[in-house]
Amino acid sequence: MLIVMDRAASAEDVERVVKAVEGLGLTPHPIPGEIRTAIGVTGNRGAIDPAALENLPGVLEIIPVSHPYKLVSREFHPEDTVVSIGGVGVGGNRVAVIAGPCAVETLEQTVTIARAVKASGADLLRGGAFKPRSSPYSFQGLGKQGLEILAAARAETGLPVVTEVLDTADVELVAQFADCLQIGARNMQNFELLKAAGRTLKPVLLKRGMSATLEEFLLAAEYVLAEGNQNVILCERGIRTFTDFTRNTLDLSIIPAVERLSHLPIIVDPSHGTGKKNKVIPMSRAAIAAGADGVAVEVHHRPQEALSDGPQALTPDMFADLMTQLGAVARAVGRSL
Amino acid sequence: MLIVMDRAASAEDVERVVKAVEGLGLTPHPIPGEIRTAIGVTGNRGAIDPAALENLPGVLEIIPVSHPYKLVSREFHPEDTVVSIGGVGVGGNRVAVIAGPCAVETLEQTVTIARAVKASGADLLRGGAFKPRSSPYSFQGLGKQGLEILAAARAETGLPVVTEVLDTADVELVAQFADCLQIGARNMQNFELLKAAGRTLKPVLLKRGMSATLEEFLLAAEYVLAEGNQNVILCERGIRTFTDFTRNTLDLSIIPAVERLSHLPIIVDPSHGTGKKNKVIPMSRAAIAAGADGVAVEVHHRPQEALSDGPQALTPDMFADLMTQLGAVARAVGRSL
Amino acid sequence: MLIVMDRAASAEDVERVVKAVEGLGLTPHPIPGEIRTAIGVTGNRGAIDPAALENLPGVLEIIPVSHPYKLVSREFHPEDTVVSIGGVGVGGNRVAVIAGPCAVETLEQTVTIARAVKASGADLLRGGAFKPRSSPYSFQGLGKQGLEILAAARAETGLPVVTEVLDTADVELVAQFADCLQIGARNMQNFELLKAAGRTLKPVLLKRGMSATLEEFLLAAEYVLAEGNQNVILCERGIRTFTDFTRNTLDLSIIPAVERLSHLPIIVDPSHGTGKKNKVIPMSRAAIAAGADGVAVEVHHRPQEALSDGPQALTPDMFADLMTQLGAVARAVGRSL
Amino acid sequence: MLIVMDRAASAEDVERVVKAVEGLGLTPHPIPGEIRTAIGVTGNRGAIDPAALENLPGVLEIIPVSHPYKLVSREFHPEDTVVSIGGVGVGGNRVAVIAGPCAVETLEQTVTIARAVKASGADLLRGGAFKPRSSPYSFQGLGKQGLEILAAARAETGLPVVTEVLDTADVELVAQFADCLQIGARNMQNFELLKAAGRTLKPVLLKRGMSATLEEFLLAAEYVLAEGNQNVILCERGIRTFTDFTRNTLDLSIIPAVERLSHLPIIVDPSHGTGKKNKVIPMSRAAIAAGADGVAVEVHHRPQEALSDGPQALTPDMFADLMTQLGAVARAVGRSL
């Protein structure tokens, strides 16, 4: 941490800050300059709140040098983490593909889609039983019945199930049925939900919030790991920007950034990330080329009848084509599908 | 709603869409053009999901003309809503001021600050018992004990209490103590929490999410109203942009925008909206000048010791100065403090 | 400046950086920590490019502590600058109002509007002779003829003229006619144009670019001042964000931010900043309440026939109303109109 | 175009708009609805300014259905354009690689780098003689001398030269030396410069502005094409967002979006797009996987001594590695390097 003093700060101001730093069990290193004094602080291991210092008289600015997360960091845990979802590893050399409908609608719909994506090589089945919808008048999901349908589709196809949980009150229920709990973008900073999901010790697929910085994203994951659950998969799904030709702006540069800072695997959701069917395949290829550990895509056998997010769903034929293309790109970057 | 057909769409494609529109109980109005056909749709009263149409063959784009919210809209309810919090009206000619510490820390701290802001003319007391914090290692609030302290401060000063609720599991508890439930920016699209807060019929202070559009913000309020609870106060608290001289970018233009579209009152939180003490007073003045129905500001008698968000808290003296300045601006725009 | 070394940096890496800092005539202050070493640097007066340091082996990050601008800074020039445009001061206790059409269309149109705004108390006349338009097919302005019309309107009303210049080739011509050269948002980083405008020694109204940080904005002004021309007025006109209810997001918090860092006056353009007639008056009030030194607004006597930006132009009656309202707000904040 | 009338609009208001539309030579199609009337407009071929209509009484909103650009659109010109730069095609099946230093510093530096990138298979040499720099105190480029050095490097290696032009006054000079004129992000809406570059009939590499929408980007290209110059290559180089782990956010989804709407080739600049050396290789792979027609990367043999943008420059060895990796990805998507 570096404490920058105002150019008008007095010697007493500097002395007071030095004492306050020592009071926190840290070591201050004053650096007197021509214009102002700065005070380097060492001994900080991650989790200090600068509030106690930044309101002292004469303090202009506190510049954090180390980061507030710890368990998620590669400094703390150098080797890549591979998360196992029902026996399928995410984060190793193989690229994982999660596919399925946006929302679980009927048993027939879900099983049909599950069989189709399994036939093309998908590793995991996704599908929403609890749906977060901007409008109270949109379809809100089938709830428990949806979870039962997902379990039936798993029994039918052998694909482990990833599904979203929206509320702490439903965590136990969803954990009974699902192989992996998804925390959606809108809940990335629903900290009680993160803690509850962490306590299940189930794998957690954590989507990046629409306006989350990388630090906030990693700190959200830190909430799960702090409960003793290291099974977190990060998921980039687009950020909110001024651009209007896609629903969100897929920020693929976060892939090499996460790889540097964290040991956790990261996948990409190009369906929500673009919101447009015709961009899902090129952006899936780009995700794998950038180094992502997998993709999650929405597939529907009758997208024009989908109860939610139809415009971004691939048909089973398009999904089969995607798998072929992803296989080629994965091999080009030294991985396999 | 306007359905724009692809220029390559066939007559059958157009006919199919016309039939689908009729199947939804709406009236299609085809407009054949030189380059392409568009189809106007009338009869839609708010709540139609376009998914059923936008995947039909030949459909290029669906342009919504009416909005998906209803109960919050001024078209539906032309008169301004005044929300009463423990007898204090928010939304009328008077400008309401909510003040207090970011977090409830001790009884002594909260009562001291409550007395100070009351003395300067504050209408309502704010203070967090449950705190959403980016890091799991930051102070998370006193929970139930914090609620009891707030109740004691109310008993002492007569100021009704506004406090945040983070989780559906705590809604009942918080509603027992608080006069108004605050839903924070990070939970603006925590739809289960919105529903649960709605069901209490208590006033709800709903903060805008950091990347929420106006439509999403109004739809979040619609979730509360759809539970039969019309007591919603909107709160602008800054959006996330590229700028770095404030913590967030306070988007004051939303005030006249809300005034046009909705009957709900809107206030501004310049403490979180700027994150900088020295910008709280000028931006509070600007908020009232723009037409806001009030402001919510953080005050701490020893900001350098605050357990959260110290850098943005006003001292009691600064708060007294703020009240004087706001009084002058309120009168200049024909309102009173 | 603080140089943060990688935790894996060797003693030789640190030594090499220390030598490099000394080679630049600066003083290094190594701060060995438990995890990594940082090196404070003093003696830097503004204008050092960190490129020479940040690629040395073992350097993780360079954190600038002082800013790269100088002449525009309040540290360098503590007193407020008042810029005189044809005898009208911008930046003192009085609030300046610049008004006129978006584009100069005809002599009759410009003189009519100039007389109307003068009658309501405007201080300066604005109007575009050279127009930057997104589309090559939109009206591009009258060029030199437009400048002659502005000069005629000035002769008629006594109002000094502010008008935009788009290209270095036109700077001389525009400077012959105008009392103040406007540099538009799209040209904020057209550095050759900034230098050329600086060399005229005429007042320059510099609009903030749509995605400019405060530092970039001040550095753009620094280009003008570096030519020996201190007559710069900054203008906030909205930034580009995800919000869609205004054309741009007016970032009024920049007003107190500029006031802290720079001696230059700052005004606000709520016409371009919101793009909506019904938001111009409330946001003008907010600008003055936040501490702006003036506003620039578009006025047209027949907005429905305006050749550009009609939707945001006030009618002369609305402008008269604006002036009354601004007078009240200006007095409330201790200034006059 | 769709004109949405206010729900309170009178029959006369509607009639007045109908007449105004006819007056513009277009065909109005009124659609009376339960709540409001909308008016479809047909016959518009691209270039109509809605200003004349949107201020008529009773008009709530104008929704453009067709786009204001024409020459750049795929509807107008269905086949892909291949731009030839000194004999090297950009836009066909081969992926083009542009490489070189950020700034031309010395003859020795430029020739050394040019030889190195040529040896690894680069197609075109880049290097800045005129440099746009945020600060007036940063190195501004060698100007004409830099152009001569580039010409010498071309003579030595056979690589055609791409270099930036900043000002209309220099267009002729740069066009004498360069094989392709680059228009930088900061000048994307410097319309006089676009026209001047267009008139040279030389290939133009047009970088996307930091906050440009797709429509603004295509309209900027339209300025060049409107001068009779179809040789435009678009270049994505990152947009400005809230994220802070890269200098800009590379918006790769624009690649499939451009491919749908325009016949022009599009390449990606991951050096400026990320600003970080360690992200250049993964994001170059991602760009090609997404369908880009090429990449432009910065290379420096002694990045720690580079006079500008050293942190993002690859060394020649890293560039050789990049070429190997790009070859594999290009083949995976059915293209060649």
Image (spheres, coloured by chain):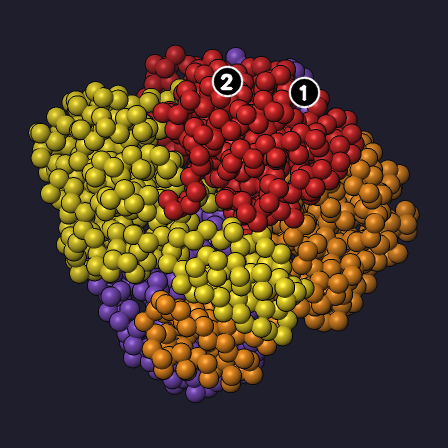
Chain colours: A orange, B purple, C yellow, D red
> Which of pointers 1 and 2 indicates the residue nearer the eye?
2
- Inspect the image, locate mark 2, and give the three-letter code of the amino acid beneath it: Lys
Q: Is residue C172 above or below residue B8?
A: below
Q: Residue at x 66, y 65 (%)?
A: C10
Residue at 67 percent of width and 29 percent of height: D118
The residue labelled by disc 2 is: D202
Q: Which amino acid does label 1 sit on?
A: Gly
User: Which residue is nearer to you in this view: C197 or A255?
Assistant: C197
Local secondary structure at mark 1: loop
Q: Quadrant of the C terminus of chain B?
A: bottom left
Query: In the shown orientation, is residue A258 left or right of residue A24?
Result: right
Q: Spot the residue most to the bottom.
A: B108
Q: In which quarter of the image is residue B264?
A: bottom left
Instruction: Determine whether, in the image, residue A291 is placed left or right of residue D28.
Output: right
Looking at the rendered structure, the number of numbered marks drawn on it comes to 2
Answer yes or no: are tags 1 and 2 on the same subunit.
Answer: yes
Residue A306 in the image: x percent, y percent? 71, 38
Coordinates of residue B314 in the picture (x, y in percent): 36, 72
Q: Residue D92 carries which label?
A: 1
Q: Mark 1 lies on which chain?
A: D
Q: Is residue D201 above or below residue B201?
A: above
Q: Give the chain letter at badge 2.
A: D
Quarter-of-image position of residue B87: bottom left
Give the CA distance from mark 1 to mark 2: 19 Å
**Does any portion of residue D270 appear in the rendered image?**
no
Q: How crowded is mark 1: few (under 14 residues within 10 Å), some or many (20 or more)?
A: some
